[in-house]
Image: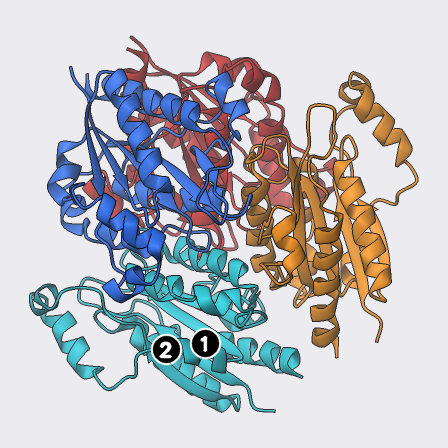
Chain colours: A red, B orange, C blue, D cyan
Amino acid sequence: MTVKLAVIYYSSTGTNYQLAQWAEKGGKEAGAEVKVLKVPELAPQSAIEQNPAWKAHVKATKDVPEVSLDDLEWADAIIFSVPTRFGNMPAQMKQFLDQTGGLWYHGKLINKVVSAMSSAQNLHGGQEATILSLYTTMHHWGALIASPGYTDPVLFTTGGNPYGTSVTVDQDGKMQENVEPAVMHQVKRTIDIAKKIKS
Amino acid sequence: MTVKLAVIYYSSTGTNYQLAQWAEKGGKEAGAEVKVLKVPELAPQSAIEQNPAWKAHVKATKDVPEVSLDDLEWADAIIFSVPTRFGNMPAQMKQFLDQTGGLWYHGKLINKVVSAMSSAQNLHGGQEATILSLYTTMHHWGALIASPGYTDPVLFTTGGNPYGTSVTVDQDGKMQENVEPAVMHQVKRTIDIAKKIKS
Amino acid sequence: MTVKLAVIYYSSTGTNYQLAQWAEKGGKEAGAEVKVLKVPELAPQSAIEQNPAWKAHVKATKDVPEVSLDDLEWADAIIFSVPTRFGNMPAQMKQFLDQTGGLWYHGKLINKVVSAMSSAQNLHGGQEATILSLYTTMHHWGALIASPGYTDPVLFTTGGNPYGTSVTVDQDGKMQENVEPAVMHQVKRTIDIAKKIKS
Amino acid sequence: MTVKLAVIYYSSTGTNYQLAQWAEKGGKEAGAEVKVLKVPELAPQSAIEQNPAWKAHVKATKDVPEVSLDDLEWADAIIFSVPTRFGNMPAQMKQFLDQTGGLWYHGKLINKVVSAMSSAQNLHGGQEATILSLYTTMHHWGALIASPGYTDPVLFTTGGNPYGTSVTVDQDGKMQENVEPAVMHQVKRTIDIAKKIKS
């Protein structure tokens, strides 16, 4: 039975899109059917225009499909990836989650197997708190939270965030740690659990 | 010295606007200069139109000013009031907070004295988690968090949420507890602390 | 395949022992092999003696076995039940969890299917925050968190705490809500998920 | 008016004692009267004996006074310092906090100005979550939480944990970052706020 994995992310300058792409790669290697999906932007075009990196990223990802409620119904497993915004997910992701009331009411989000990833500019700039904020919402969904914990030795070499893979980026958007192996493990684990739940 | 209090809320059908109005009343009684301010709506007009209570509330509060970044600079104390959305603040409030990066960068949010209020439809539907999610962001601001705790006997009679006043509303939007006294105390406490910080 | 369920609780005057007993009943009805286990007391005997209800409860439950690390290895699924202590689990439970470093190091806690329950004296006295504090530790274990969410209509009638069943008790220790149906559902759900994970 | 600062810590092998000593230094430089106080150990002597570093630390700090409830009443400001234990404070600290029910009941903990520090072995091993767990309890006290946020440029150079100073230690207990400047700032800030509250 093939697991359907939705990788749902928000990215302004590319970090979380990169994490999402690694999740896609890991998902395919693990035999899942994968969709990489962005949440709709809320910022006005004028704000984006003022930030060259943001503008370039929006352009570069214009063909990445926007996530829909149907994608949530479709998915067996979901990986979320978001930068921190003051220790919580960005409004863009929250706005998408806030629109799931109908699916929630009809029980369509129950038993989705989920985990999350994050990024921040400071070493302890909300990497943990941001993921935990997302999981709080997942409890409301009735999702199953399959965070990585310390389920593989590779996690000790990539920051060891038990709530989900996280990365620190510098002012220029350069990732400070090589977290690709941690993403690969997290995705595989999420899919393995989803396979059991689906069976 | 007069404390400047901003009561910043999001409300779709009126509960948190009512909480905000009580906060305004309490703030004035405590001698503060008070502004009641709503955060901008993110929902499309079509969604609002489909919900008569929401539509009516939007109309009824059309003259309440929208909060601006200047209001944050102006304020010595801030009371936030939000309904839960899956155990976290609504995207509308998060979107406003996400826009405070410039003020944050210039240190303009430091030492704001803050506390928060919440509402939910279930008795334990996120009343606690929602307020705590807001405080996580306040730590990033360098704000001072003056939650009510159990600083007055009245709080034991109104639900006793130590993180901030919260209320449960039924399907028709009717509040299930009389929390006005708790709001009045919370606001007075927030202002008292702000007065000391400002001095 | 029979699921092995450990119901691990701390109780000073009986509320969480009652929740644990309902969990035991629900577990057996769902076909699981169930152990009800208390965590060791930390309070000095003198403190217990001064509180007649506490003293009586300690006596009444003297034959309930104390949880051991072997019980954790044995279990496929775990239900935790704790009163709040200032918005977090009691030190008694934390002390037990802190001793799981060896099991953790050897990966013996991975994929345990867990959920938690709580109680408090105020309506919003930490019912949510206490359960969430326990789940934070579960992420470190690499456990799978199967909170109830709103996965059954009965939850809407028993307080609707999506993180786990919770109950409010008055000064005399009397439960203010009938949460037995919520406990029964939560346990069944936890076991159903564990059955799939084990398969 | 001299601020009375209690630095309350738990340390098994020395990291948080070092943080506490820096806090003491910072407190004295800021003109406060400072007490460094350890919370009582809960581990059996046999466990301590098996770990040479732990044993050595216990011996080295045998003359540091144990914190008492009177110290809490005495203090205007409190800095907590704890290692993470699975994303939450250690049971030793929780056990101490759990004993403050009497002070809490009589309102003796209201308006204490508090902030917290943490350590972990992994880069994202609970540094954020542990401090936030402590603040949840502080809300119940009615304390005022004066986390560092980003209130000084030095914080950007020392990990930038807005909830409180945190440090990563390697397997040998060696700190991976120089956080002394962050501790110094955090303490000064906590005292500055306490001075205003006390006035």
Q: Which residue is mark 1?
A: D72
Q: Residues within 10 Å of mark 2 (few under 14, many from 20)?
A: some
Query: What residue is at 41 percent from the left and 21 percent from the top?
Result: A112
Position of D143 relative to B182 (above/below): below
Q: Which secondary structure, mark 2?
A: loop
Q: Which residue is mark 2?
A: D68
**Looking at the image, do the residues carrying marks 1 and 2 touch, with CB atoms under 8 Å apart?**
yes
Residue D139 occupies quadrant: bottom right
Taking the view exactly as shown, the residue that stands out farthest to the right is B63
Percent coordinates x, y for residue B68 in the rendering: 81, 50
Q: Are marks 1 and 2 on the same chain?
A: yes
The chain letter for the residue carrying disc 2 is D
Q: In the rendered picture of this protein, how many numbered marks are placed on residues?
A: 2
Q: Image quadrant for the C terminus of chain A?
A: top left
Q: Which secondary structure, mark 1?
A: helix
Position of D193 relative to C153 (above/below): below
Query: What residue is at 56 percent from the left and 34 percent from the top?
Result: B125
A162 horizontally vs D101: left or right: left
How many angstroms separate mark 1 from mark 2 (CA)?
7 Å
The chain letter for the residue carrying disc 1 is D
